[in-house]
């Protein structure tokens, strides 16, 4: 079973910058019977982009559930397939003269840094060690992730009720992603929490964002009607 996909409307914007993004979409929160979003809030679960685009199809949802259950019930083969998919993504990027990059938490928040991976008969501490020259990136709501490899970029996601964790993440030097309710397309605030706001809707390549910035996102889909505090009103 193929694990990684590409063609997400937002990640396609990165192709103009020379990057080809591959994303792993699992069934978020506990939709598969297993928890993959340990710090999920009510607001983020309601606004989750799991059903955006192709995610609205039952076939896609069933595939995400199968992948998630495979991760928990047959992890060895899951990780073997993940290595194969990343290798295929690298080859595809090379053929198109593009830089391949990978998001493993498209609709999940798993600590990938703690799972050993075997590649070409060698055991690595994690998938990032198996591909040291490849850029990985994700959003996370887990504030205390440690020993993050240099080729894995994490942006912390602000949500309803996780202000304490936001402060922890800021203390760790992480950029913070914030979803704003904007009356007009270009109305992101100039600053938030004392940091300049960067327009993170321009592309999905968070590892290119300037340091010590807020990655500003506009409310989309179900998030436009948010009443939980997940979306910051301006």
Image (spheres, grey):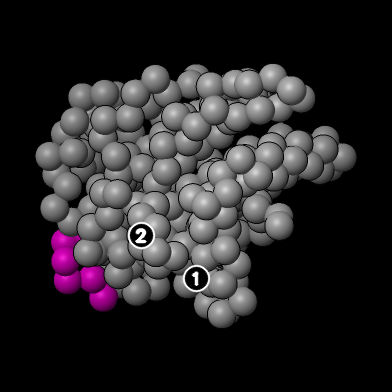
**Vertically, is 73 above or below 45?**
above
- Residue labelled with disc 2: 29
Residue 79 against residue 26 in the figure, above or below:
above
Q: The C terminus appears in which quarter of the rendering?
A: bottom left
Q: On residue 52, which mark appears? A: 1
User: Going 57% across and 79% down the picture, which residue do you hit?
Assistant: 57
Residue at (65% x, 51% y) in the render: 4
Residue 134 lies, in percent from the top left, at: 64, 28
Instruction: Looking at the picture, tell me which residue is in the foreground, 22 or 69.
Output: 69
For marks 1 and 2 on the same chain, the one whose residue lies earlier in the sequence: 2
Residue at image coords 26%, 75%: 225
Task: Say few, some or many: other residues with alpha carbon within 10 Å of mark 2 (under 14 / 14 to 19 / 20 or more).
Answer: many
Eye-nearest disc, 1 or 2: 2
Cα gap from disc 1 to disc 2, whole angstroms: 16 Å
Q: Residue furthest right?
A: 95
**Picture quadrant where residue 223 is located:** bottom left
């Amino acid at each position: 079973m193929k694990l990684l996909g590409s063609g997400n409307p937002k990640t396609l914007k990165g192709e103009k910058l020379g990057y080809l993004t591959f994303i792993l979409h699992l069934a978020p929160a506990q939709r598969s019977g297993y928890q993959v979003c340990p710090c999920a809030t009510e607001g983020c679960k309601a606004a989750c982009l799991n059903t955006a685009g192709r995610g609205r199809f039952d076939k896609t949802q069933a595939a995400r559930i199968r992948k998630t259950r495979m991760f928990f019930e047959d992890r060895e083969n899951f990780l073997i397939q993940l290595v194969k998919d990343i290798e295929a993504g690298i080859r595809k990027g090379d053929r198109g003269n593009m830089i391949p990059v990978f998001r493993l938490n498209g609709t999940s928040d798993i600590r990938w840094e703690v799972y050993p991976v075997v590649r070409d008969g060698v055991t690595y501490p994690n998938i990032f060690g198996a591909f040291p020259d490849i850029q990985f990136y994700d959003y996370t709501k887990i504030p205390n992730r440690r020993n993050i490899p240099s080729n894995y970029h994490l942006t912390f996601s602000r949500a309803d009720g996780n202000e304490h964790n936001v402060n922890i993440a800021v203390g760790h030097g992480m950029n913070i992603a914030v979803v704003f309710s904007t009356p007009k397309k270009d109305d992101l605030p100039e600053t938030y929490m004392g940091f300049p706001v960067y327009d993170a809707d321009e592309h999905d390549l968070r590892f290119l964002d300037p340091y010590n910035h807020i990655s500003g996102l506009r409310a989309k889909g179900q998030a436009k009607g948010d009443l939980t505090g997940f979306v910051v009103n301006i």
